[in-house]
Image: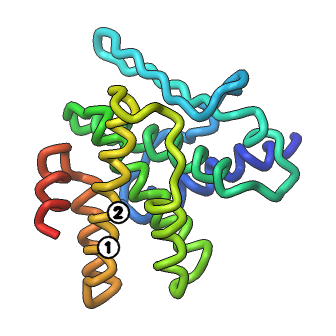
Amino acid sequence: MSAAPPSLCLARKVQVDLERLYAVEAPPVESFVRVANGERETVLVRKTRGSLELRVNLPEQALSHDGSISLDLYCQIVEGVSHFLTLVERARRDLPTTQLELELQAEVDKFVLVKRAAGATADAAVKERLFSNVRFLHKAGSVRGERYRLANQLAARFVTQLSTRPSAPARLQDLRRFFGAGQREKLEMVMAA
């Protein structure tokens, strides 16, 4: 039996980290991963009678790396896995989800996992890189461009609020509540900041 490619192992590790963080379980994401031919990360969803079909497309570079990976490729893996896990959990609970909710959750998940990898003292640097020093691929004023910009701004506000919580258990409780929340409750949590 041959070993899984490094990125599939990384996608699975991201899934395990997020599942532990949020105390949820989903089918192994690697069964749903495909190569995104010349594209960035995308998650395709098709709802049919009684079932939900998912496919997580990841860039070829992310799937064929040699052990080192750029922040951009890592964030694409986290985003794809975050979308996958959120969709699976919302479907399990028979709850709707929106594209804004998916993007907002993914922005929070990227912050949490990148900060964990960078170390506890890297809070400001990670916030700067993920929320301030950002280049958007979709034009301002376009539907997608505005959704990504709004998700980024809302996530920045939420994680800033989160960092003021007095203890790790309080932060974990807030993260789990945020993950389980629908779009409306997520927005209420952000605006309470």
Q: Nearer the viewer, residue 177 or 127?
A: 127
**Mark 1 and mark 2: span between their CA atoms?**
6 Å
Q: Give left or right: position of 111 versus 58.
A: left
Mark 1 residue element: helix
Q: Which residue is mark 2?
A: 156
Q: Residue at x 50, y 39 (%)?
A: 27
Q: Nearer the viewer, residue 52 or 161?
A: 161
Tag 1 near tag 2, CB within 8 Å: yes
**How would you rate the neighbour count of disc 1 (Cα within 10 Å): few for under 14, some for 14-19, many for 20 or more?**
some
Q: Position of residue 77 (x, y in %)?
A: 60, 46
Q: Amino acid at mark 1?
A: Thr
Q: Residue furthest top?
A: 49
Which quadrant of the figure has residue 22? bottom left
Q: Amino acid at mark 2?
A: Ala
Q: Position of residue 82 (x, y in %)?
A: 46, 46
Q: Which mark is residue 114?
A: none
Mark 2 residue element: helix
Q: Give left or right: position of 121 versus 11.
A: left
Q: Position of residue 128 (x, y in %)?
A: 49, 69
Q: Nearer the viewer, residue 93 or 172?
A: 172
